[in-house]
Image (tube, rainbow, N blue to C red):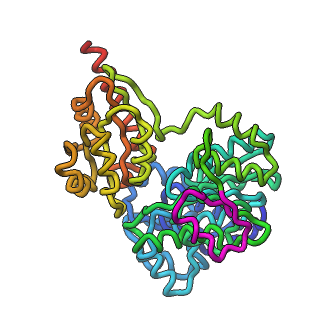
């Protein structure tokens, strides 16, 4: 690491004890900071996470936020899931205490160049492929951020000769100060997280912070086929270039080829990686085939556009399992495709009523109490040759820790159904 004394002796509040908050608290403690953590969840809900704290010297406040935890701090680190309206953020600002994101903290310590990937859809696949291409070219890649471990959980082991491939969200970009990726990739820009942002422009404004500190020696890669990318680069000082889908290359692969070219890695290396790539867990992942019905786990699809892409890439009629925590998105966008492609839809979670009101009169809709119930109902509605797909169009936080847990619960429900079908057959 570089700047290893930067945080020594400082009083730092970490707001939120999710994955990134935990990693950042442990990192800052290891560097000699006096760390205080505050989380609104009860201690029992956080028991597993609390056991992973590196030291009892890290002060922990659970179940409530108090002003005393923030008062007297030199800085605060905000976990990405917590909005600016949260009381600890307001208290910090009222006292002039700077608030940073976890990726900003890790960036100040990172000795290696960063390739940062953001966008509404395709971030995880693009990040994964970029890491695989670097490794195939004989370079050591550290893939982290929203995929794998948080940046601050990896930075202690990063060397100057390494390359960091970092998946970043709009939430994480809100509180950067000096974060400066050498290559920034924006996969696409569609309406997303409108439960947090006032409108699409505010959301795009958060995404634009990815090139805030870039200069003439850096690169900004944009999707030529994306409507919003034309005006996106206004004000960028970095070298702006575009990637395009083409025969044999989807948008994620095209972005990786463009970035690899900047780094002197041949297209041939990229194509070999693409040919060997088996896909990601929770993204169009085939789980089982039961009595002629195929089950696909697409839990990573947390936007309407992601679900539409998934349905277009399924040749069969489908039963869709959707729902979760509403992000303020317009579900009407999927209606035309739903008429043609869906036999039925089974809804779960907080957004079930909202989605049902949109689908009413268009396709058959049922609501389920939990994922196991949804899988059972979807199977009952499917015919041999159909596909049952979990492609939620929503975040997972109303029922699950994250989309990965949601996907695992779906897969377990499907495999249990398969075992029961085998037994009864």
Query: In what quadrant of the picture does the C terminus appear?
Result: top left
Residue 13 on image: x %, y %: 54, 71
- 49 relative to 100, above or below: above
Residue 388 location, x and y as percent? 33, 34
Q: Is residue 412 left or right of residue 13?
A: left
- State which quadrant residue 265 falls in: top right
Residue at position x 26%, y 26% from top?
383
Which range is magenta? 220-242
| Residue at horizontal 28 percent and vertical 20 percent from the top | 420
- 5 or 186: nearer the viewer: 186
Q: Residue furthest left?
A: 361
Tell me residue 73's x, y (percent).
57, 78
Residue 306 location (% of width, % of height): 44, 49
Q: Name the quarter where the N terminus is drawn.
A: bottom right
108 in relation to 145, above or below: below
Whether residue 402 is visible here, answered yes or no, is no
């Amino acid at each position: 690491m570089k700047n290893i004394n930067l945080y020594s002796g400082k009083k730092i509040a970490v707001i939120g004890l999710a994955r990134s908050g935990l990693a950042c608290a442990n990192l800052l403690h290891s560097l000699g900071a006096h760390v205080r953590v505050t989380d609104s969840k009860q201690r029992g809900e956080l028991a597993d996470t609390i056991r992973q704290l590196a030291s009892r010297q890290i002060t922990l406040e659970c179940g409530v936020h108090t002003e005393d935890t923030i008062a007297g701090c030199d800085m605060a680190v905000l976990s990405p899931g917590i909005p600016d309206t949260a009381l600890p953020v307001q208290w910090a600002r009222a006292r002039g205490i700077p608030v940073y994101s976890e990726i900003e903290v890790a960036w100040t310590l990172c000795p290696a160049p960063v390739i940062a990937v953001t966008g509404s859809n395709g971030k995880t696949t693009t990040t994964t492929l970029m890491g695989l291409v670097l490794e195939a070219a004989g370079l050591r890649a550290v893939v982290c951020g929203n995929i794998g471990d948080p940046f601050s959980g990896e930075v202690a082991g990063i060397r100057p000769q390494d390359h960091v491939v970092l998946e970043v969200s709009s939430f994480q970009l809100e509180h950067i100060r000096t974060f400066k990726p050498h290559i920034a990739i924006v996969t696409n820009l569609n309406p997303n997280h409108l439960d947090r942002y006032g409108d699409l422009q505010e959301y795009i404004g958060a995404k634009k912070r990815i090139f805030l500190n870039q200069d003439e020696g850096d690169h900004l890669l944009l999707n030529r086929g994306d409507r919003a990318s034309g005006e996106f680069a206004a004000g960028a000082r970095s070298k702006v270039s575009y990637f395009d889908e083409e025969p044999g290359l989807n948008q994620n692969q095209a972005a990786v080829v463009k970035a690899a070219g900047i780094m002197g890695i041949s297209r041939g290396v990229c194509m070999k990686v693409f040919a060997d790539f088996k896909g990601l867990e929770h993204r169009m992942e085939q789980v089982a085939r039961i009595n002629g019905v195929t089950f696909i786990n697409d839990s990573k699809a947390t936007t309407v556009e992601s679900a539409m892409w998934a349905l277009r890439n399924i040749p069969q009629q489908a039963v869709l399992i959707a729902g979760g925590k509403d992000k303020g998105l317009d579900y009407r966008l999927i209606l035309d495709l739903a008429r043609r492609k869906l036999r039925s839809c089974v809804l779960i979670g907080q957004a079930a009523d909202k989605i049902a009101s949109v689908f009413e009169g268009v396709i058959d809709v049922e609501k389920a109490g939990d994922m196991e119930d949804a899988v059972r109902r979807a199977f009952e509605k499917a015919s041999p040759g159909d596909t049952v797909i979990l492609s939620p169009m929503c975040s997972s936080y109303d029922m699950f820790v994250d989309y990965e847990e949601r996907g695992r619960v779906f897969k377990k429900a499907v495999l249990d159904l398969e075992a029961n079908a085998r037994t009864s057959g």
